[in-house]
Image (cartoon, helix red, strand yellow):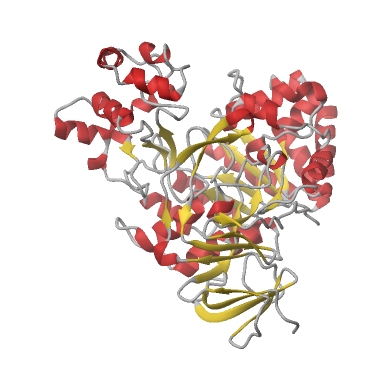
Amino acid sequence: MSRPSLVIRNGTIVDGSGSDPYEADLAITDGRIAAIDGNIAKGLEEIDARGKLVTPGFIDVHTHYDAQVTWTNRLSPSSWNGVTTVLLGNCGVGFAPCHADQHDLLVNLMEGVEDIPEVVLTEGLPWNWHSFPDYLDAIAVRPYDTDIATQVPHAALRVYVMGERGADREPATAEDRHRMAELVAEGLRAGAFGFSTSRTLNHRAADGRHIPTLRAEEAELRTIAHAMRDTGIGWMQIVSDFEDQDREIHLFRRLARESRRPVTISLLQSDAQPDGWRTLMSHIDEANAEGLRIIAQVRSRPTSILLGLELSQNPFMGRPSYKAIAHLPFAERLARLRQPELRARILAEAFEGSRRARRVERWDRMFPLSDPPDYEPEADSSIAAHAARQGRSPEEVAYDLLIAGDGKSILYLPVTNYAGGNLDAVGEMIAAPNSLLGLGDGGAHVGIMCDATATSYTLTHWTRDRRRGSLFPISWGIKRLTADNAVAMGLNDRGQLKVGLKADINVLDYDNMRLRRPEIVYDLPAGGKRLVQRTDGFDATIVSGQAVYRHGEPTGALPGRLLRARA
């Protein structure tokens, strides 16, 4: 063997297969793993991984970096958290295909569904594409810190073919359906890894309109499924409310059967139906036993919103006196909020807004976000519990927490996956044989959440730190973040540490891995803000044999590229 370009020495190999860890050196040549053993010649570059874990790079199957990939080379915060491959285009939203007169409509949709500010998208998107293959070509010319895979988004497709009729959710004609199917096949043959759609009431455009795909008829989805069958490429990704659970899952079973492709659906625990996810999971297991491939995507922690004065939402945003100063710059607004008379006025007012908006007053379900963050807090640490012990109202406690110090305190509000006040249900979900770890939503909801660190959380919480239930082996956690997602996506060149596979690798100081507290940065186009979060303990993240991060800092290497699926 010629002299390796990089050798990782003395590390503990956790190879992604689920097998027990073992100690060995690992050599990389030409971007691939050249050897794993104990007798490797000196490399051009070496990393001493003594006492560290050497793992495959993580694969994130649910992100929304569709816009971010057009203006930056870095897919942070996912890439800061060990992710070396991202899949974007989820939930049916994206920016291609798109006619020139539909830019505003798609921006409005992405702003509403995924909480990315309009000004950021308007200033940041270059719109140097028309068709979906054009979009792929536009992002293919850029280098990145991760590899990028895409999906054809149903909402953009529907609007492209049907115009306002599609946006208004009118039924598709036979001609509309045929044209959409043609364009899905075109996108898949150009390199997309699947097709995505949304059937949830939670997905609305910024102007309040429902997502165009909400009630898309079975005939429309079936025609697209046939196109996927003919190409033999990709999966169908679906998010649904499952209001009529039996009806929806039987629809998805028919789509899996007719497409002969995998179907992946989001699975969450709701407060309204705490055990509904179990029924759905049993349907999924039954479908797989029949030879269909339906996979649940699950998050390894609650779906949550973060509340703060610098963030997009806070518990007082619906009170009239707060609304009157909400437009002020953060520093000026904070100074006003510290005035005793304004404090008293806001605390005396009632919240004005929808039932959904009023969830920011769930004091019994709201917690101060600690550093490091605790995403499985106990009830006695809630705002309501703090207030009861102090003999004050929850509003007072929350208000004073938010204006204290530099005014950047964050409150944590679990929305789903926390019906029992713990993560026991999540533990069952992530252990289920027909589930994948996903739903991190990197690139989206930039002012209210930062769940892209769910990859890191899977390891720190579920294999090391959890005190309210059992732990999983580290080899299990690595397999779930790597090989399982690679296989599901059809990425046969990565996901495990084996000779000949692509050298996408993390070197982890596992004992010292620690999620940091999320913070706001102003690095989006037009000075837009976003929540980001880092994790300590990533000694190196390597893509195609090149270290893109060392100890959390970028090296300048950008070997990541657009991936194109093949039948």
Quarter occupied by the C terminus: bottom right
Pinpoint residue 313: horizontal percent, then vertical percent. Answer: 44, 27
Pinpoint residue 321: horizontal percent, then vertical percent. Answer: 36, 11
Asked whether residue 49 appears in the rendered view, the answer is yes
For the point 31% across and 15% down, which residue is it?
A: 346
Pinpoint residue 200: horizontal percent, then vertical percent. Answer: 57, 31
Asked whether residue 291 appears in the rendered view, the answer is no
Compared across the picture, whether 410 is left or right of 122 comes to: left
The foreground one among 472 and 367 is: 367
For the point 68% across and 39% down, which residue is it?
A: 66
In the rendered view, tell whether residue 510 sits above or below residue 167.
Answer: below
The part of the image, by quadrant, that contains residue 108 is top right
For the point 70% across and 22% down, which residue is it?
A: 105
Quarter occupied by the N terminus: bottom right
The foreground one among 174 and 383 is: 383
Pinpoint residue 222: horizontal percent, then vertical percent. Answer: 74, 39
The foreground one among 358 and 135 is: 135
Compared across the picture, whether 334 is left or right of 534 comes to: left
Count every numbered label the image shows and give the total: 0
Which residue is outermost to the bottom? 39
